[in-house]
Amino acid sequence: MFKKIPLLLIASIFLWSCQTGEQYEKALDPLEGGRNFIENLQQGDIKKAHFYMLSDPENEAYFKKMSDSYFSLDKEGRQQLRQASIQINEISAVDSTISIINYQTSQDPKAHKLKVIQTPEGWKVDLKYSYGPNL
């Protein structure tokens, strides 16, 4: 019996280390979903920011432009973005599953809006609202 314990321990560690993909905590409310998206994008953690985005082809295209824009900045520009603070101006609930976050950053005083939608995977940002043709 005792000989099997180390073998089971090694096997469980191996299986745990082989898990693919990083695990992120799902956002439990719209503020958390929007804030996590904005913060991780500013920090350059593109994979984590992507986790907090509603995944569809149109959002993927907008997200690619945003991440390309981040990586086109020079080292100083990315550093300034990482150090910028986020100010949430207003959170408006459209209904129980959709909210609009009005925010700005210390680097860009222009107000921006994000639509955050509740999904089974947590609250996710819908970039079509912010960057779509209707704006």
Image (cartoon, rainbow, N blue to C red):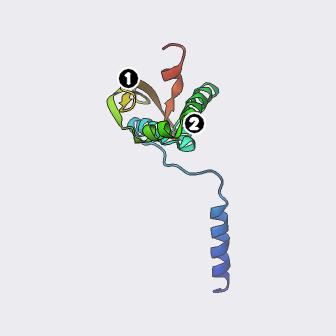
Give the image quarter of residue 38: top left
In three-dimensional space, the C-alpha distance between marks 2 and 1, rounded to whole angstroms, equals 21 Å
Residue at x-position 54% and y-position 14%? 133
In the image, residue 36 lies at what x, y percent? 45, 41
Residue at x-position 66% and y-position 53%? 20
* Quadrant in the picture for the N terminus: bottom right
Whether residue 50 is visible here, answered yes or no, is: yes
3 or 39: nearer the viewer:
39
Q: Secondary structure at mark 1?
A: loop
Horizontal side, residue 64 vs residue 120: left or right: right
Which residue, as the protein is rendered here, is positioned at the far left?
A: 89
Question: Which amino acid is tagged 1?
Answer: Lys
List the residue tagged with mark 1: 110
In the image, residue 75 lies at what x, y percent? 52, 40
Question: Which amino acid is tagged 2?
Answer: Phe
The numbered dot on residue 28 is none
List the residue tagged with mark 2: 71
Q: Is residue 132 above or below residue 43?
A: above
Whether residue 37 is visible here, answered yes or no, is: no
In the image, residue 52 lies at what x, y percent? 51, 38
In the image, residue 64 lies at what x, y percent? 61, 31
Which residue, as the protein is rendered here, is positioned at the far bottom?
A: 2
